[in-house]
Image (cartoon, rainbow, N blue to C red):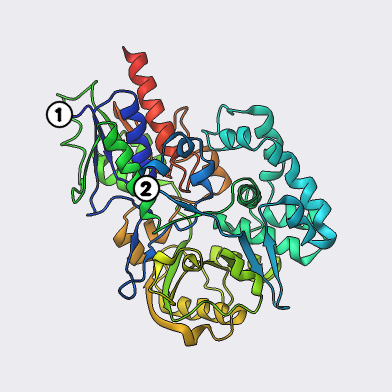
Amino acid sequence: MHDAIVVGSGPNGLAAAITLARAGRSVLVLEGREAVGGGLRTEELTLPGFRHDTCAAVHPLGLASPFMRSVPLEQHGVAWIQPPVPLAHPLDDGSAVLLERSLPETAEGLGEDGAAWRRLFSPLLAGVDGLLEGILAPVLPPRRPVQTARFGREALRSAEGLACGTFSGERARALFAGNAAHSTLPLDAAASASFGLVLALLGHAVGWPIARGGSQAVADALTSILRALGGDVETGHPVASLDSLVTDRHKGERLVLLDVTPRQLLGLAGDRLPSRYLRALDRYRYGPGVVKVDYALSGPMPWRAAECSRAATIHLGGTLEEIAAAEKAVARGGNPERPYVLVVQQSLFDETRAPAGKHTLWAYTHVPNGSPAAEATVAAIESQLERFAPGFRELVLGRSVLGPAALEARNPNYVGGDINGGSAELRQLFARPVARPTPYRTPLDGVYLCSSSTPPGGGVHGMCGYHAACAALASRRRSR
């Protein structure tokens, strides 16, 4: 009875559904799990009363994405919490480098490299809204050509090349490397600098907020917005094939948008797809996986650098050289002894996350795709936590470990533990998932991909779903 079906209720699936509903389409979202959200879920993974974000935890793009800004999240229950500092990066001397909201204050903390940090980020910050519109759009044609080209000159460099060519001191290089390592690329890879630029820029422009009560609040708000527009959502409804969704009766009328990666598309529609497109999908590359550990703690983290208690997000890995070595080891199929670890301490700023006086800790590191070495990786993560917060182990009341296989079992889009829907390497910047004028459109009439395996890629911004829905609606208008 619906003229648009969306498979998957991650942020991109919900964004696609909202965009279609706004255009007057009757929309149904089908979700295989019993709760909406994809990577936007919050559960008691360790002990009763401890609420952990199962994947996405910090949401700068929740405030900056053009799609997210277009929907009334706050009216539907989202309360953003801004920690005093977006990010802290501790070093072995007992200090921490801080990414402050204020560009001048950040520069002041970088000493000799303060002026260079200002020169790098001041022009980007001056045109941040237009820049984000450009880089969160399909690559070609550029939406904001002048701003995108200016950004691209630096963004297409390797993170190592940009950091070493711009900064002379350890503190600024480490701060930039920690941001760039979100790419899951080795830091000598082309375009790895783009992640460092965008994430630091977002810290200055909008901060790195968390959602009160957990990331599930964002998914629930998007679902509420969709229902207010007349859309429907069915959970506990896995889709194994397109046969029931795309029939002769629906041909030319129904739109089907799939919040899935190429591997799931092959499973849903492989026998319907032409051989050339099949071969292109088969060449699609997935990136490293992650091992994620959630902790229930008896108290706050005992950071050696007291400044770390001002930030929800912490990057562990020491210097640029150490982070680069860890990410290169992962890219070569190894598991580094000193991994780069992303840490979030939500309960310091959100009392709903843990019982009174107790705390949660969220941590993950990169591992080779499909790595079975979760337990060994946990030991390496905890060694890094203890390195920068001596006494951490004594606070642990409970832990939950999700390695690549467990993550994929919970969310099939996380192939081999890849939470970004595919490698962010340069080739897949321009061909994601395949090289087509409209990357969202499949060869099947009315069937579109809307996941993070399409531009602009991973992140809780909804822009993949938004652009896919816009492409689908435009195609239908042209066909009429």
Q: Residues within 10 Å of mark 1 (few under 14, many from 20)?
A: few
Does residue 367 appear anywhere in the picture? no
Q: Which mark is residue 239?
A: none
Residue 89 locus on image (x, y percent): 65, 67
Residue at image location 34% in from the left, 74% down from the top? 46
Answer with the quarter of the image where residue 142 lies: top right
Residue 231 locus on image (x, y percent): 25, 34
Query: Horizontal placement of 264 versus 357: left or right?
Result: left
Q: Is residue 126 above or below residue 82?
A: above
Residue at image location 31% in from the left, 45% down from the top? 9
Q: Is residue 364 above or below residue 101?
A: below
Residue 253 locus on image (x, y percent): 23, 21
Count of numbered badges drawn on the protein: 2
First reached walking from the N terminus: tag 2 or tag 1: 1
Secondary structure state at the residue bearing disc 1: loop
Q: Which mark is residue 1?
A: 1
> Which amino acid does the dot numbered 1 rest on?
Met
Residue at image location 73% in from the left, 50% down from the top? 103
Answer with the quarter of the image where residue 53 lies: bottom left
Q: Nearer the viewer, residue 132 or 320?
A: 132
Query: Horizontal placement of 378 versus 24: left or right?
Result: right
Residue annotated with mark 2: 77
